[in-house]
Amino acid sequence: MESTSRTRPVYTMGIAAELLDLPPATLRLYERKGLVDPARTDGGTRRYSAEDIDRMRRISDLQNGGVNLAGIGMVIGLEDENAELRATLDLRGLGRGPSGS
């Protein structure tokens, strides 16, 4: 898979935590729960992409809205599945119809 500017893992945990206004321990928790899977350097240091940051922001928003981490896992999983299905339909030329729905 070719790396784009949105998928390129460039942010350290400290920078990602600062961007999200979350403690680093929360980012590690999200990883332990399987909600995010940051890239690792050869030395094992986590690196986050802009897409990872967006995903963690969504997770944090859901958590602040009262959804527990198990529920967030389900929501995020369904959102990922929906995005994959939409991408498949778009590749087949079966994406959104003329009504835009």
Image (spheres, rainbow, N blue to C red):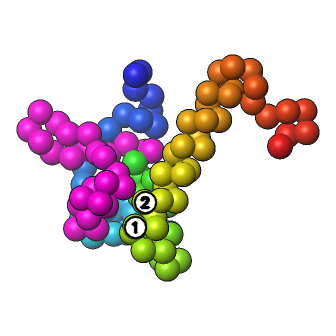
Q: Residue furthest left?
A: 43
Task: Name the residue at 65% across, 21% down.
Answer: 91
Question: What is the x, y in percent for residue 61?
Answer: 50, 69
When asked about the image quadrant of residue 28, the answer is: bottom left
Q: Is residue 50 magenta?
A: yes
Q: Tell me whether the residue at label 1 lies in contact with that at label 2, contact meaning CB atoms closer than 8 angstroms.
A: yes
Left or right: 88 as drawn, with respect to 65: right
Left or right: 95 as drawn, with respect to 69: right
Q: Where, quadrant-wise, is the C terminus in this rendering? A: top right
Question: What is the x, y in percent for residue 2?
Answer: 41, 21
> Can residue 57 be seen from the camera position used here?
no
| 71 w.r.t. 95: above or below | below
Q: Amino acid at mark 2?
A: Gly
Q: CA distance from mark 1 to mark 2?
A: 5 Å
Magenta region: 25-51
Q: Which mark is residue 73?
A: 2
Question: What is the x, y in percent for residue 76?
Answer: 49, 55
Label 1: how many Cα within 10 Å (few below 14, some 14–19, many 20+): few
Residue designated by label 1:
70
